[in-house]
Amino acid sequence: MWAKSLICLHAFTGAVLASSRVPLDRRQGGLDAFIEKETPIAKQGVLDNIGADGKLVKGAAAGIVVASPSKTDPDYFYTWTRDASLTMMVVIEKFRAGDKSLESLIHDFIDSQATQQKVSNPSGGLSDGSGLGEPKFNVNISAFTGSWGRPQRDGPGLRASALISYGNSLIDSGKKTLVKSNIWPLVQNDLAYIGQYWNQNTFDLWEEVQGSSFFTTAVQHRALVEGSAFANALGETCDACSVAPEILCHLQDFWNGTGVVSNVPSNGRSGLDANSLLASIHTFDPAAGCDDNTFQPCSSRALSNHKLVVDSFRSIYGVNKDRGAGKGAAVGRYPEDNYQGGNPWYLTTLAAAEVLYDALYQWDKQGTLSVTEVSLPFFKDIVGDVTAGSYKKESTEYTSLTKAVKSYADDFLSVVQQYTPSDGGLAEQFKRDGGDPASAADLTWSFAAFLTAASRRNGDVPASWGSSGTKVPSQCSGKTVTGTYVTPSPSPW
């Protein structure tokens, strides 16, 4: 979404926020005070960007999540399936945590997606599912027909996960019939799409590289795993879900021994990409252990990769001066990035913090923390005399390590605090040297990313998606399942 298609790679250059943006907040009041102040601003920032009542997105259809109110330099006044789904996952999480005022908005979103799934577009239509891979639409839910990097195959999986989360809450409330009429048809289509197309090329979430994407593969696997359980709960079947083990097998191909090569082919890049941090937080399962195969946040793989990705930005951004190894830093998309000047992003810096908050939750839940030869370099940056081993929750070593990780995670939030304007607005980026907000203003994903990072810091986590039951096959295959697609027609809520 955010950036541009491969065709439009250099279409937007040099754009910054209007000079009327208020001066930067220079860390006044401490991190806790900043989070307390920013949380309602971020929530309102999300709501302001969702039609039809969002005050910054007039003209957007009900339930449509608009990427940003910005219409020029860059024009993000569209809805992307990926971003909308990630945003609604946050909204649904808040609803499930007790904010019932959000339910009508969730209903609007589901109804909008029932309409959107039926829209023929340059990627195709619904009859063979191909149109579900279309990345973005106009805010009135009509097809965007301009040149773009398409298809992008992460959207269906992310949307399915969001709808399953809400659907499960309705099942728990005894509303299975409503779920079967209003939610299952949409989820069924998205799961069928994954089963049929997972092994074909895709543009990555930054819309620049075509091939295989770590992020896309990870979220596709999650969707099929939880989709299978969702179907069973409804008395339905999910033929597509049978390929989940094959997708998990493919996910292992992105691991090179020390880090994740986020896109294959890498197009001449190092392969280090915040795509991998986002994959870990969006497939975080609070009921899971430190599973390397699904790159859970507390896994040795995720931590080793975290170090490599963050370190790749330390020397290239002026704002990271004096932020050496073991200190939180501003994080961008990938070190070779030059879009809008190749700046740090708020949401990727927040993701670096969230991985660590997730890991802390998992260690606390299982009562042990293991330092392996793979994760040792990560831990050495923050606790210099650490050695490989397994440390129980009652030990002084465990206390020392988790305290250091918590402080390190907070460092990343402090970076965001330092470069957040005093009005709390979160743009897409902040300048790599001066730190001023840059690119699209009031980015919906930036606000959503802040909300999840703050929630994880507070120990609030989403429901399990069942990752602990997944196993990697002894031999990979490219098996796919041809999908059957239905025309959704939800009943009144």
Image (cartoon, rainbow, N blue to C red):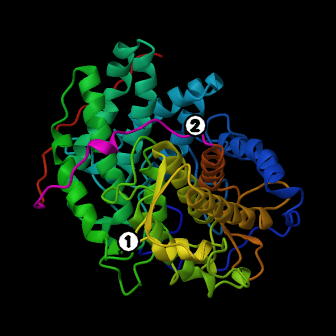
Instruction: Report the Cα–Cα distance between label 1 and label 2.
Output: 28 Å
Q: How crowded is mark 2: few (under 14 residues within 10 Å), some or many (20 or more)?
A: many
Return the x and y of residue 78 as percentages of the image width and height: 54, 53
The kind of residue on which mark 2 rests is Val
Q: Residue at x 69, y 60 (%)?
A: 410
Q: Which residue lies furthest to the front in this view?
A: 395
Instruction: Kindly tell me whether residue 141 is visible in this rendering.
Output: no
Magenta region, main secondary structure: loop
Q: Which mark is residue 91?
A: 2
13 falls in the magenta region: no
Q: Residue at x 50, y 38 (%)?
A: 462
The kind of residue on which mark 1 rests is Ser
- On screen, 425 above or below 103? below
Q: Give the range drawn in magenta.
A: 459-476
Q: Residue 262 carries which label?
A: 1
- On screen, 112 above or below 77? above
Foreground disc of the pair 1, 2: 1
- The image quarter containing residue 326 is bottom right
